[in-house]
Image (cartoon, grey):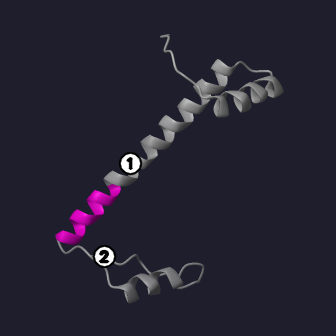
Amino acid sequence: MSITSIRITDDVDKPLEALSKKLDRSKNYLINQAIKEFLARQSVEESRWQDTLQALESIKQGKTLEEDDVNAWLNSWGTNERKTPPKP
């Protein structure tokens, strides 16, 4: 485990202190949880960005679907005549 020093402004420290007391957890614990959550969200955002880049590349290559075909496929969901997904 490493030690990192941070400066916390009063507008963050006061609510953090209050939450720490309310939850009977240390400020250190709450800060670590917040950082873990932030890092997890950043990982998801990076994954979505990579998906977006891949989708844009597919469009450049002409791999697109007609809206009517997609809508017909989606509208068949939950029916006895479910269609197969359209392909580019």
Nearer to us in this view, 84 or 40: 40
Q: Is residue 56 above or below residue 74?
A: above
73 relative to 7 in the view: left or right: left
Lower position in the chain sequence, tag 1 or tag 2 = 1
Q: Is residue 53 magenta?
A: yes
| Label 2 Cα crowd, 10 Å radius (few <14 / some 14-19 / many 20+) | few
| Label 1 Cα crowd, 10 Å radius (few <14 / some 14-19 / many 20+) | few
Nearer to us in this view, 66 or 85: 66
Hey, which quadrant is residue 62 in on the image? bottom left
Q: Is residue 83 magenta?
A: no
Helix, strand or loop status at disc 1: helix
Identified at 32% across, 52% down, the residue is 50
Percent across and percent down for residue 77 are 55, 79
Identified at 45% across, 85% down, the residue is 71
Real-space Cα distance between discs 1 and 2? Answer: 24 Å
Q: Which residues are magenta?
A: 51-60
Residue holding disc 1:
47
Helix, strand or loop status at disc 2: loop
Please say if the residues under marks 1 and 2 sit with CB atoms less than 8 Å apart.
no
Nearer to us in this view, 59 or 10: 10
Q: Is residue 78 above or below residue 16?
A: below
Percent across and percent down for residue 58 are 23, 66
